[in-house]
Image: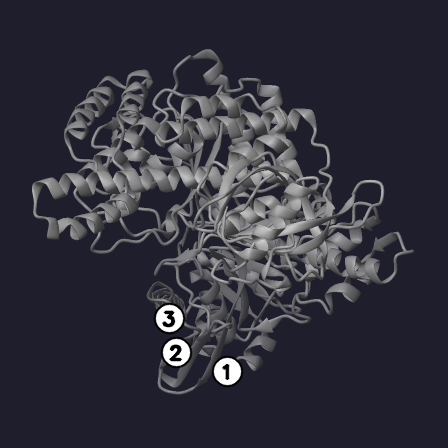
């Protein structure tokens, strides 16, 4: 084995073993001549001078006998009498053709190399060196491989001969006529000025194929070195002619440095670049721009910085897909099948995509739609975009905009800047190779702005169907057509998207999944996916329905299915561990009982409401970026001076809702049988638990008002009722947003009755019918209606309207329970 040392240009011998084989080798006793600076190859005929007495005697012995002599190269040429350790063991058995004694006592000898041999032992002889050598038999090389390698060697040798004029054409012809690969390798190796270490390594390489490969590498390196030397010499001579001789060394160093840098571009490269420009199909404006820049480029020095900038620009223009398109699939049935395979539910976006495909079938040219999928994390917004690409036969690109704050990320940098590049839109199109992909702009609501510009403003042109056919990237500085791209943007919250950008997109809301939908997603998608990921395909892993529902209800509390997927993955990984420990077990049945074994105690109490109805404690509904949530509001009345305290890290809008609720209650003290001066004698403390989480918005207005009234009149609130709605000073209930998410959260929390503003009834058609059947939805217009549904009445108590917007409470027991009731008002009302 051999190894090439690139640092020193030396081929080192790693190991070389020759085994005795009586049938394939012959041992011979031969006189030995150690050579100083020559490595003698088989099939090589050469003459050299010999001056050492022992070497002359060895040659005389050979010429008087069978004329054979063993030629071995010394490891160190400056040693006059080398011993056994200073001579290479592998050498060449040669035949002495002529021996000529010169007057000065030296001998000139002509020798022909016959075969490789390895020294087995050194024979003691005082007159001359003598060894017992074993002839090496070379293994056969396959004819096809030998022919291919021989052709490469001959071509490389011919290339070297064209550079080095000292090699005659006759010699090249003689080499080309050699048909034996082994003889060819040895003959060619002898023609090159390789280092002795490299030649010795070639001599020691027995297999012809290995020797040919090694020789080919050495020839290529020799050609490279020769070219560099010629270039350096040529440049140095030219500079020397123009200046003094003492300037020669400096100019030679400069020539070396130039050789180490970028080479001058050849005419062939310029012609190839010009051919690409002529053959590239581009817009008229783009083609004219590229030709203009190419004319400038040809006049510049390739080493200049400006030439590099122009070359990069031209290559960018040539690499863009100006008219390359993917073939769009217009099979509606196939597209619908693919969308349903990848996602369960999500009817609205699926319907819009199929509508677009229908229009595409009827109209040849249609502007690409721009959809904005808004919903909590984990509901499948990004994966839906990937499915759209598969259903329409387009290529898919995803660009995450989270944290992007530089306008140049969208529009690119101008070419005046160092390291300028096109924007991410153009870069992505170059990667995909077509100009009509599905382009997913992920997390479009997470962009921000700073002194470098506003990227959302740059997106206005990209996402405007009336403008994006002439999108102008700062780097390209020409118009590029984006109108064929199917843009899909995703966001968690719509308010974080600037209004002008919202106006350019078709917003489709993806609400959280119901438990029924989560079960089907887990059964049809997630479980099989995790079984495959965890290497359990060959095992029978079964999840019962109760097990999946237990995971959904007791171990996840989310709008999407990301945590559900994570919990299923955790179970599968634990099963994989059991499989490794116990290879015999092949069936794993996951039940609701075994879920707790794998995942630990339940993290959430599903479907559990308060055990008893409580005074001042009301369940509200809130909307968050991850879906709907239950929001408890509790109120306590303590002696004081009318101070209102609101806690729970509430925002300004929510605090104002609390003040509005208190003002409404004060205006209705007579109708609610409350002491008119309760706010002077008592302090009100309204608290929303989970105080570390910021909360804001007006939709908790009726919730806080109900909690205040309940605390004042000592009436409990039904524990299985939840409500949402904004309150005015006159008690009107105004509409709110995020109704679907709130109702789904109430359903997950075990709520069975929900009070909503009457103007939100139009939003109920988005709620799954399976959810509506399990819950009672009450629509109200005024706060009095909320109180009539929420407050618990005792035996004999009646809560009724005195007029359109007042109540009368009749209960002797109630008077004893609530010292805040105005008894004089009670008598007057009767």
Q: Which mark is residue 645?
A: 2
- The answer to the question of whether label 1 and label 3 lie on touching residues, with beta carbons closer than 8 A, is no
Question: What residue did someone put label 3 on?
Answer: 666
Name the outermost residue toward the left.
243
Rendered location of residue 768, percent (x, y) = 61, 41
- The answer to the question of whether label 1 and label 2 lie on touching residues, with beta carbons closer than 8 A, is no
Query: How many numbered marks does the figure carry?
Result: 3
Rendered location of residue 259, percent (x, y) = 27, 44
Q: Which mark is residue 819?
A: 1
Foreground pick, 644 / 823: 644
Judge the density around disc 2: few (<14), some (14-19), many (≥20) Cα neighbours within 10 Å.
some
Q: Earlier in the sequence, mark 1 or mark 3?
A: 3
Left or right: 251 as drawn, with respect to 93: left
Q: Secondary structure at mark 1?
A: loop
Left or right: 750 as drawn, with respect to 375: right
Tag in front: 1 or 3? 3
Above or below for 468 versus 682? above
Tag in front: 2 or 3? 2
Structural distance between the alpha carbons of marks 2 and 3: 16 Å
Rendered location of residue 658, percent (x, y) = 39, 68
Foreground pick, 779 / 520: 520
Structural distance between the alpha carbons of marks 1 and 3: 17 Å
Foreground pick, 71 / 255: 71
Rendered location of residue 575, percent (x, y) = 79, 58
Quadrant in the rendering for residue 716: bottom right
């Amino acid at each position: 084995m051999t190894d090439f040392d690139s640092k020193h240009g030396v081929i080192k011998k790693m190991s070389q073993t020759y085994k005795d084989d009586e049938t394939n080798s012959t041992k011979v006793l031969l006189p030995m001549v150690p050579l100083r600076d020559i490595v003698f190859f088989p099939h090589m005929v050469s003459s050299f001078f010999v001056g050492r007495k022992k070497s002359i005697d060895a040659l005389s012995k050979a010429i008087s006998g069978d004329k054979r002599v063993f030629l071995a190269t010394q490891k160190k040429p400056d040693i006059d009498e080398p011993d056994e350790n200073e001579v290479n063991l592998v050498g060449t058995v040669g035949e002495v053709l002529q021996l000529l004694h010169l007057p000065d006592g030296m001998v000139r000898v002509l020798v022909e190399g016959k075969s490789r041999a390895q020294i087995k032992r050194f024979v003691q002889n005082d007159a001359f060196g003598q060894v017992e050598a074993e002839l090496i038999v070379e293994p056969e090389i396959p004819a096809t491989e030998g022919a291919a390698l021989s052709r490469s060697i001959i071509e490389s040798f011919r290339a070297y001969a064209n550079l080095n004029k000292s090699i005659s054409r006759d010699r090249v012809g003689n080499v080309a006529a050699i048909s034996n690969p082994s003889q060819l390798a040895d003959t060619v190796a002898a023609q090159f000025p390789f280092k002795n270490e490299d030649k010795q390594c070639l001599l020691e390489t027995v297999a012809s194929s290995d020797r040919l490969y090694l020789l080919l590498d050495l020839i290529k390196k020799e050609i490279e070195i020769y070219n560099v030397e010629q270039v350096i010499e040529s440049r140095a001579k030219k500079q020397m002619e123009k200046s003094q001789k003492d300037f020669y060394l400096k100019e030679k160093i400069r020539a070396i440095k130039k050789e180490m840098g970028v080479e001058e571009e050849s005419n062939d490269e310029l012609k190839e670049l010009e051919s690409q420009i002529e053959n590239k199909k581009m817009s008229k404006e783009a083609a004219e721009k590229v030709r203009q820049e190419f004319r400038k480029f040809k006049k510049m020095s390739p080493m200049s910085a400006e030439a590099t900038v122009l070359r990069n620009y031209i290559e960018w223009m040539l690499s863009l897909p100006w008219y390359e398109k993917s073939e769009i699939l217009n099979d509606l049935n196939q597209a619908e099948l693919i969308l349903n395979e990848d996602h369960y539910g999500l009817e609205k976006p699926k319907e819009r995509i199929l509508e677009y495909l229908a229009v595409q079938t009827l109209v040849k040219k249609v502007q690409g739609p721009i959809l904005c999928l808004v919903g909590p994390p984990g509901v499948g917004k990004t994966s839906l975009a990937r499915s759209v690409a598969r259903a329409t036969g387009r290529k898919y690109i995803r660009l995450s905009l989270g944290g992007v704050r530089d306008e140049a990320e969208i529009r690119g940098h101008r070419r005046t800047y160092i390291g300028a590049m096109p924007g991410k839109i153009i870069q992505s199109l170059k990667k995909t190779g077509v100009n009509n992909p599905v382009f997913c702009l992920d997390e479009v609501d997470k962009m921000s702005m700073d002194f470098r510009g506003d990227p959302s403003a740059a997106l206005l042109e990209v996402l405007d169907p009336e403008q994006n056919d002439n999108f102008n990237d700062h780097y390209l500085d020409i118009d590029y057509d984006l109108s064929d791209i199917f843009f899909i943007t995703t966001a968690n919250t719509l308010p974080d998207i600037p209004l002008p950008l919202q106006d350019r997109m078709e917003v489709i809301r993806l609400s959280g999944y119901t438990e029924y939908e989560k079960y089907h997603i887990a059964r049809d998608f997630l479980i099989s996916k995790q079984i495959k990921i965890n290497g359990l395909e060959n095992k029978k892993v079964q999840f019962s329905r109760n097990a999946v529902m237990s995971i959904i209800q007791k171990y996840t509390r989310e709008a999407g299915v990301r945590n559900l997927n994570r919990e299923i993955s955790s179970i599968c990984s634990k099963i994989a561990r059991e499989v490794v420990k116990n290879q015999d077990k092949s069936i794993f049945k996951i039940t609701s009982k075994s879920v707790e074994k794998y995942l630990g105690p339940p993290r959430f109490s599903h479907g559990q409401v308060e055990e008893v109805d409580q005074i001042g404690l009301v369940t509200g509904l809130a909307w968050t970026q991850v879906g709907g949530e239950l929001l408890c509001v509790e109120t306590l009345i303590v002696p004081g001076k009318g101070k209102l305290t609101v806690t729970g890290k509430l925002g300004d809008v929510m605090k104002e809702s609390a003040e509005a609720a208190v003002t409404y209650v004060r205006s209705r003290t007579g109708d609610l049988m409350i002491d008119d001066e309760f706010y002077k004698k008592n302090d009100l403390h309204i608290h929303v638990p989970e105080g570390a989480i910021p909360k804001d918005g007006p939709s908790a207005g009726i919730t806080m008002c109900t909690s205040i009234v309940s605390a004042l009149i000592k009436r409990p609130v039904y524990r299985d009722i939840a409500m949402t709605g904004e309150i005015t000073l006159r008690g009107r209930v105004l509409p709110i947003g995020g109704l679907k998410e709130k109702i789904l959260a109430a359903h997950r929390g075990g709520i069975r009755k929900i009070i909503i503003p009457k103007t939100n009834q139009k939003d109920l058609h988005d709620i799954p019918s399976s959810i509506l059947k399990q819950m009672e939805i009450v629509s109200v217009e005024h706060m009095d209606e909320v109180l009539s549904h929420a407050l618990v009445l005792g035996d004999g108590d009646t809560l009724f309207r005195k007029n359109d917007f007042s109540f009368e409470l009749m209960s002797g027991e109630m008077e004893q329970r609530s010292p805040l009731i105005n008894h004089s008002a009670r008598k007057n009302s009767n």
